[in-house]
Amino acid sequence: MDTQAREVPDDVFADILAQITDFVRTRVMPRETEIMDTDAIPEDLRAQAAEMGLFGYAIPQRWGGLGLDLVQDVEVAMELGYTSLALRSMFGTNNGIAGQVLVGFGTDEQKRRWLPRIASGEVVASFALTEPGAGSNPAGLRTTATADGEGWVIDGTKQFITNATEAGLFVVFARMRPAPDPGNDIAVFLVPGDAPGVQVGAHDTKMGQEGSRTAEVTFSRVRVGPEALVGADGGIGYRAAMTSLARGRIHIAGLAVGCAQRALDESVSYAASATQGGTVIGDFQLVQAMLADQQTGVLAGRALVRDAARKYVSGEDRRIAPSAAKLFCTEMAGKAADLAVQVHGGAGYMRGVPVERLYRDVRLLRLYEGTSEIQRLIIGGGLVRAKKKERTKA
């Protein structure tokens, strides 16, 4: 959790952000088609990302990371969202939902063992929560961890696990058997990728985000010792998942703003140069209206995600604001990408045109780390509960 004081001063962060922006614009963007066609991030880009510290930019400095807090993280996310989302996905689980479970809930020994290697990129960490029948809400988990002597035996299947095919560490959520007490039986375990009984399926073929690998992972009587239990205590799994996901939702909102900015920039560039009947299409008022809607969404989304990040870091709001930011920004990015294709006309439907890839890439943002529907339930339910509590006190 982001309870530590800011480790990176604003002037130093400005330099880091400028380097990331340059990397995205000059090194990654020219190779977006290559990433899409090969369904992989080129090794030289991976090596440069590791050298820049991107595999651990949100990991505290004492554990080998850059130590960016969430306010700084979302500025990075908005830059990473400007290009192929597969780049960010390559190190996203290390910095986000997997790495932050260790940062916020791991023992010192667990942090010493794993975080420096996660921050350097030597180890890729995967967040193994989603299952068939248990996605946005972990309450439906069926994977079990059965006590066996001092250790545990894990059985279950996870699906759509990002970076599973490259993972050196799985952060696995499972129900403890026997349960320590009713309603508090979800725990988190650190399972090495090469542990006997861990089986990773072939990577999924997806609608978009080529280069980002997801796969099914099966745990068949996987034995782990007591040191694998995160926090050395059971029952924290639900809280760890919700805390990590809330932080991740603000990061995803930042990514969505970056995607929407790219959609807008591509739209303006095309509108200012393409012609129809001898007239530059940007001179048509209905095209200008589409650009206006994109610009308004980007400005509103950027302000919202920055505000949500500040409230998360201060502790003012770590539940409703993250969900509101993810809901608005990811829905907005979807609309911006759709408008970008519309501005481009038939050209926008052609493979190899940036807005065609963008249109497919952004669709996933409304699904993972909590669907838009789940965000609406969190926001609406949270508001009602707060009002009931207020009235009870009165």
Image (cartoon, grey):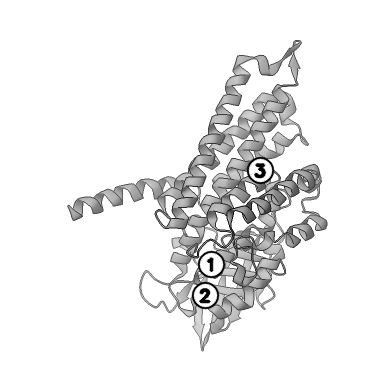
> Residue at the location (51% across, 61% down)?
244
Mark 3 vs 1, N-terminal side? 1
Tag 1: Cα neighbours inside 10 Å, few (<14), some, or many (≥20)?
Answer: many
Left or right, 185 with reference to 70: left
Q: For residue 286, which quarter of the picture? A: top right
Q: For residue 213, which quarter of the picture? A: bottom right
- Whether residue 326 can be seen here: no
Disc 3 to disc 2, C-alpha distance = 33 Å
Left or right, 251 with reference to 319: right
Q: Which x, y percent locates residue 96?
A: 58, 60
Above or below, 391 relative to 182 = above
User: Of 232 and 367, which appears nearest the observer?
Assistant: 232
Determine whether label 3 and label 2 are within 8 Å by CB: no
Name the amino acid, label 3: Asp
Disc 1 to disc 2, C-alpha distance = 8 Å
Determine whether label 1 and label 2 are within 8 Å by CB: yes
Can you identify the residue that label 2 sits on?
230
User: Disc 3 on helix, strand or loop?
Assistant: helix
User: Of 326 and 159, which appears nearest the observer?
Assistant: 326
Numbered tag placed on residue 354 in the rendering: none
Name the amino acid, label 2: Val
Can you identify the residue that label 1 sits on?
101
Q: Residue furthest left?
A: 394
Can you identify the residue that label 3 sits on?
361
Mark 3 vs 2, N-terminal side? 2
User: Disc 2 on helix, strand or loop?
Assistant: helix
